[in-house]
Amino acid sequence: MPRTGACRGCRAQRMSRRGMTPGAFRVYAASWLACAGVVLLLALRIAAEPWLPTGEAPDYALWLLGASEAKPPPPACLIVVYDAAGRQIGTRPSDRCAGAPAGPPAAPAAAVHNGPLLRALACALHSLLALGSGLIVAAVLRNALRRLFRRPAGFAWVARARA
């Protein structure tokens, strides 16, 4: 019977097994919440990085999308414009320079045209990967702490020595 403390036939006593008590559960819950909170805040910060005003789309995400050429190549040279008094009034990028070797081939126009869309997709992919990694780490941490604080199911029966 579930409420009996001793067996009538063999006189074995029912004892609670060692394991997670209410105090141990509080420690388990507090430690998991503290650790998971730190992990998820870090994942959120990493996920938000490309969306900040100073952020850029991560190169690995652009590579995963097959858009490594989405960034325009640097200009082969710069043309500096001076006024009649000799002061510099501006610079302008040029694809080719007179007398200089040709630079790398220009990116296809379609890839440059879709650049903002590809950058947004790369930022979204980066954010999903960062948040997903944070959730996986929090779940693994939860399982590890559960094993540490686990209470075996059921009761232990301790048989009395017969006199």
Image: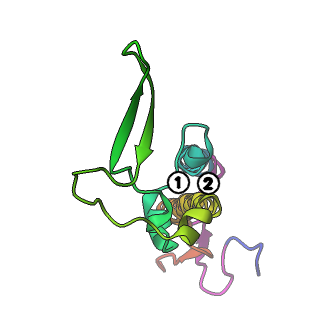
- In the image, residue 74 sits, relative to residue 9, either above or below, namely above
Residue 53: tell me if it is visible. Answer: yes
**Pointers 2 and 1 in contact (C-beta within 8 Å):** no
Q: Which residue appears at 29% of the width and 59% of the height?
A: 103
Q: Secondary structure at mark 1?
A: loop
Q: Is residue 11 magenta?
A: yes
x then y, percent, for residue 155:
61, 74
Q: Amino acid at mark 1?
A: Ala
- Give the quarter of the image for residue 154: bottom right
Q: Which residue appears at 27% of the width and 60% of the height?
A: 102
x then y, percent, for residue 88:
40, 21
- In the image, residue 126 sits, relative to residue 11, either above or below, namely above
Q: Secondary structure at mark 2?
A: loop
- In the image, residue 37 sits, relative to residue 62, either above or below, namely above
Residue occupying the far front of the picture? 84
Predominant SS along the magenta part: loop
Relative to the observer, which residue lies in front, 151 or 110? 110
Residue occupying the far bottom of the picture? 9
Disc 2: which residue: 21
Give the crowd class for mark 1: few <14, some 14-19, many >=20 residues within 10 Å.
many
Q: Amino acid at mark 2?
A: Thr
Residue 37: tell me if it is visible. Answer: no
The range drawn in magenta is: 6-26
- Tell which tag, 2 or 1, sits nearer the viewer: 1
x then y, percent, for residue 77:
33, 45
Please identify the quadrant where the N terminus is shown: bottom right
Disc 1: which residue: 57
Q: Which residue appears at 56% of the width and 48% of the height?
A: 50
Relative to the observer, which residue lies in front, 160 or 35? 35
Q: Is residue 23 magenta?
A: yes
Q: CA distance from mark 2 to mark 1?
A: 48 Å
